[in-house]
Amino acid sequence: MPGTNEQVAERLTVLNATMKAIEARTAVLDVISVAVSAEEVRDAVMRLLGVTEIGAHAIHEMPLMRLTLYNGARIAAEIEQLTAQT
């Protein structure tokens, strides 16, 4: 996945946030399910996982199937590939 350094950095931000969400998927689903607004979801996910606003937004917008363990291996491989590019 070629791109500028900025694009690669943003993609890594999203992928790393996704990995954290996979590892804490039950807690992530809990905070999402009780939130009353998108801002509340973003803030709760940022606090829970220690991720940036970009990462929290990505987690909020992603389909639930992305939070599965089998998706984690694919994400880890992409993180490794992108990290090698930088």
Image (spheres, grey):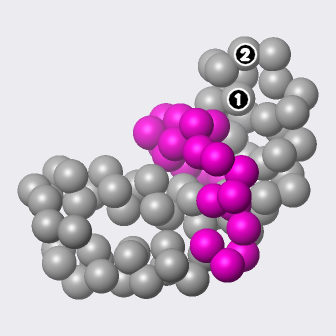
Q: Secondary structure at mark 2?
A: loop
Residue 72, given in percent of the width and then of the height, sits at 61, 75
What secondary structure is marked by label 1?
A: helix
Residue at 31% across, 51% down: 10
10 up-or-down from 15: above or below: above
| Residue 28 in the image, given as x and y percentages of width and height | 78, 48
Question: Dot 2: within a 10 Å radius of its alpha carbon, few (fewer than 14), some, or many (20 or more) residues?
Answer: few
Q: Is residue 5 magenta?
A: no
- Is 82 on the left-hand or right-hand side of 3? right
- The residue nearer to you, when weighing 50 against 75, is 75
Drawn side of residue 10 relative to residue 62, left or right: left
The three-letter amino acid code for the residue at tag 1 is: Val
Could one spot residue 46 in this view of the protein?
no
Check residue 37 in the rendering and tell me which mark sits there, or answer none: 2
Question: With 23 as the anchor, is 82 left or right in this view?
Answer: left
Q: Main secondary structure of the magenta part?
A: helix
Name the amino acid type tagged 2.
Answer: Ser
Estimate the x, y position of residue 54 in percent, counting from the top left. Answer: 44, 39
Q: Say the numbered circle drawn on residue 15.
A: none
- Look at 67% across and 78% down and name the residue there: 70
* Residue 60 covered by magenta stretch: yes
Quadrant occupied by the C terminus:
bottom left
| Residue depicted at x 27% and y 74% | 82
Where does label 1 land, which residue?
Answer: 41
Residues at discs 2 and 1 in contact (Cβ within 8 Å): yes
Q: Nearer the viewer, residue 69 or 37?
A: 69
Residue 56, x across and y down, in percent: 57, 40
Looking at the image, which residue sits at the far left?
A: 4
Q: Residue furthest top?
A: 37
For the N terminus, the quadrant is bottom left
Magenta residues span 49-71
> Which of the 4 quarters of the picture holds residue 31?
top right
